[in-house]
Amino acid sequence: EAGVAQSPRYKIIEKRQSVAFWCNPISGHATLYWYQQILGQGPKLLIQFQNNGVVDDSQLPKDRFSAERLKGVDSTLKIQPAKLEDSAVYLCASSPQTRNGELFFGEGSRLTVL
Amino acid sequence: KQEVTQIPAALSVPEGENLVLNCSFTDSAIYNLQWFRQDPGKGLTSLLLIQSSQREQTSGRLNASLDKSSGRSTLYIAASQPGDSATYLCASKGNYGQNFVFGPGTRLSVLP
């Protein structure tokens, strides 16, 4: 079974530029999450989708971050304009539509903002 | 609001030693708790998931326990190997639909 796929693995941009990350969850997983992980910290939830609807985006900085999940499968996370403090690893995770909610993560996309 | 802590932040042990990693959470109304491993530059790999009704789960050399009343979970690693060197994170999921809250992790080094 293929795991969660993410791209790009690495991205370096200058502040005020824009960037987009892509995620393809495990086939059949209804729930998709985007997390931000700053070096030395645990992941922090940015947004949760159930199929193609947003369940929780309370911690998403909506003035600069946006995310969508097309047709309930792939998802894109965009940052525009980027700030220095956005330098982090952006992790995508998916979960089957069962109540136990076990999380399965991708390899992550490492963003460096100069 | 749930807070999850992991102490120590880093641990170094000689190969072959049995060890325990600790995870503490402030709100005992959890639905389940998941342990992960993260290698440098990689994503998180799920190790064990314990439901709130369970006391422990085992997978190979790993055993995770859960004590909701004391707000603690432990991950026991038997006969540690250099390949076990990684950061270990725990995350708890709330009983009322709240999402997983992650601890900061314990960085483990197993020396040959």
Image (spheres, coloured by chain):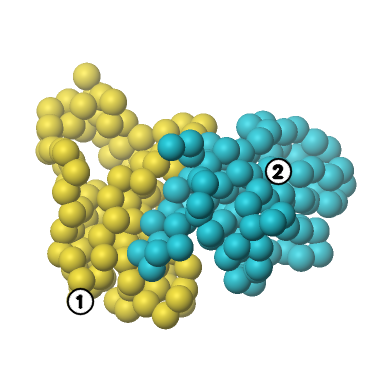
Chain colours: A cyan, B yellow
Looking at the rendering, which quadrant does residue B86 occupy?
A: top left
Q: Residues within 10 Å of mark 1 (few under 14, many from 20)?
A: few
Callout 1 touching callout 2 (CB < 8 Å): no
Judge depth for marks 1 and 2 and give the one in front: 2
Residue A2: x and y in percent read 48, 36
Given residues A40 and B99, the one toward you in this image is B99
Label 1 marks a residue whose chain is: B
Q: Residues within 10 Å of mark 2 (few under 14, many from 20)?
A: many
Q: Residue at x 53, y 42 (%)?
A: A4
Give the residue type that dot 2 points to.
Phe
Q: Is residue A2 left or right of residue B88?
A: right
Q: Which residue is mark 2?
A: A21
Looking at the rendering, which quadrant does residue B68 occupy?
A: bottom left
Q: Residue at x 61, y 44 (%)?
A: A24
Q: Is residue A11 above or below residue A51?
A: above
Q: Which residue is mark 1?
A: B69
Residue A58: x and y in percent read 64, 72
Given residues A110 and B95, the one toward you in this image is B95
Residue A6: x and y in percent read 61, 38
Given residues A49 and B95, the one toward you in this image is A49
Query: Judging from the image, what secondary structure is the residue with disc 1 in?
Result: loop
